[in-house]
Amino acid sequence: MKHALTLRVGPAVFRVGSPWASPLDALARLYSGYPDASDEPADFTVRLRPLKPWRRHVRPSIFITGDHSLADAAPMALAHGLLAAEMGMNLQMALGWRRHLLLHAATVEKDGRALILSGESGSGKSTLAALLGERGWRLMGDEFALVDLAGGGLWPFPRLVSLKNAAIEAVRGVAGEGRLGPLMAATAKGDIRHLIPRPEHVAAMDRPAPPTLILFPRFGAEDSAARPVDPAECFVRLTQASTNYVALGEAGFRALTGLVSSVPAVAIDYASGAEGIAMVEALWDEAR
Amino acid sequence: MSAVLLVSLLRDPSGAERLSGAEWTALIAAARAERLIGALAHRLAGMVVPPRVALILADARFDAETERRGALWEADRASAALAGLDVPVVLLKGTAYVAAGLSAGVGRSIGDLDILVPRGSLDAVEAAILAAGWEWVKPDPYDDAYYRRWMHELPPLIHRERDRMIDVHHSILPLTARRRPDVAAMLADAVTLEDGLAVLCPEDMLCHAAAHMLADGALEGGLRNLWDMHCLLGDYGEQPDWWAALEARGQRHGLGDVVARAARLTHHLYGTAVPERWRGLTLADRLFIARLLSRDGWGQERRWLLGQAFYIRSHLLRMPPTMLARHLWTKWRKGYRPVG
Amino acid sequence: MQYRVEPGIAWLAHELGPMTLLYHRRSGITHMVSEPVPQILDALNATGPADAGAVARHLAAHFDLSAEGGIEAIVAARLEELAGLGLIRIGAA
């Protein structure tokens, strides 16, 4: 493997390999503020691989693989190599992480307590988390919430935040151009740029916080609405949002039942980023 | 070379205390690619390793335990589904090893449930399995016709709720292969365990593992298959008359040369105690060894052409050449690519 | 038809309002059930190997049950489902 990079984010170390330099150059630049992990053994190996050996140079096409892979993954253009590397890291975590319960969720922290924003791609969780991170909240992560299997606390996993389409401008307006990665145009999910978390949030990547509110945000609704979600429904929704609940067995059962039994949940529908932020902060104030 | 390091640590774990961070990363990638991370984690339990490596190995042992539980549950469900039929149902491969508490099951990664039933009972077994919630995986009519006519197992089935696969075998080699194992003897001499599940007798377990790897396969997962055999031979090798019985059983199944080759390879790689006559390597054995050790520190198989040669060889073993050409042409026409 | 529970702690139960989550240890599968399933499982645990009639009588003795005639049929149906899922075993031993 011609080019390699080792990264630590929170509790996980990734070794990323690529026959092309450009994706790893981009990765190294954007993660330059992160702790040096070059001597650490890696929890996971990610490999960007040419789809076929001859596709390394001619119409280069990337197949994402590594320790864990999906045989039917769609290949990606070299221009989207940075995104491929990020997806590769997500894939390893989703399929291979066992030290915490994983939920597809963003997490932010304020005054020592954490908020979980649970949702799939398109729910707006990453955008909300990025905006909150610029308004006095600590960004703990935008893709995976890591729930401690013993005590139920949340552990940070602050990777680059993936912003899509209109969210790019909205975040650029508050965070500035210097904190954004290159534009990847016309990916399968539209235009994407990555946001580098604030340095103080990166520095806090080993500081956990207890969860005190769970939100299920839904972006793009006509009318804004907030509705409490009872623990049974919350449990079902979070098992669907978890990539490793089943793999964790008894420990997963205890962690998730503990979480939904002790932390209130609300589903919110909102039409704009500003509206979403306002609802989140209002609900947070109520929950104190 | 990571595959070489993997083999040497499985053989002698004490070498682990001198590895650098980068060497650990490469070793773990190779072990995962060979599906031997669980076995390695058990071999290294109790050794002094860096903290992160200790966590990685603990995760691997945890996953192996999860797979063991899942495998035994699938066996239990299959057993319940087939309880009404008066048919011997014999567990094969990884599930058999864990059900019987064998060392080959320690740290083993187990995918599908494999069972062996008499060919005459296939229709009844198929009906009972479908009635209990399993369904066909691939409805491709060519594959299906090929399976039913030539293969030693039913087309693959998956449980609709549990999402787990079951492979129902009626022999241990495809019907197109030259060799004719004595399946009736395998079924007759199967051993019943406490909970009513059955496994092959020890000699047949070895013959099956050797056949599966050498007479049937492309050598994929070969290091793991050989580790299974190393463990089985370790468990049974001390028994009186074991080696003579194994050799005789191998001859009976037309697998004598395959068993001998497997013994030579495990002895060479893992240091398995075997009789004198199985301690050298033939020229062909060395080609096998090269193929088996081709995994690098990124988890890739480096000698791609060698891999292709083995893939074609494995198909040759299953089918006469003219059939091979027709099968591959039909497969490639539909965009199928062999895993390489 | 006799049913029994497995020895030891066969499942972990956690109530979430009207629903009960059951983590079945032997299979690693989580089931979400509601009344009367948790009560039936507790009854079978208490009676030892039993048929639907015995379980129904145990329930009637411990709970205020309104539809007396139909209890055994309901219990029999639930027991069959539970056995199908492998949460309980068929037979006395």
Image (spheres, rainbow, N blue to C red):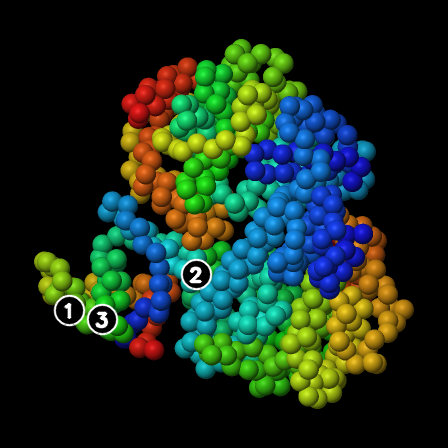
Question: Relative to residue A191, is residue C80 depicted above or below?
Answer: below
Gap in angstroms between the C-alphas marked 2 and 3: 24 Å
Q: What percent of the width, then of the height, locates residue A248?
A: 48, 50
Residue at (81, 33) in percent of width and height: A57
The amino acid type found where label 3 is placed reads Thr
Question: Relative to residue A202, is residue C13 depicted above or below?
Answer: below
- Do the numbered discs 1 and 3 sit on residues whose CB atoms are within 8 Å? no
| Residue identified by numbered label 3 | C47
Mark earlier in primary sequence (1, 3)? 3
Residue B182 visible? The answer is yes
The amino acid type found where label 2 is placed reads Ser
Q: What percent of the width, then of the height, locates residue A165?
A: 55, 20
Q: What percent of the width, then of the height, locates residue B88?
A: 51, 80
Q: Is mark 3 on a helix, strand or loop?
A: helix
Residue at (39, 20) in percent of width and height: A276
| Residue identified by numbered label 2 | C27
Q: Nearer the viewer, mark 2 or mark 3?
A: 3
| Residue identified by numbered label 1 | C57
Gap in angstroms between the C-alphas marked 2 and 1: 30 Å
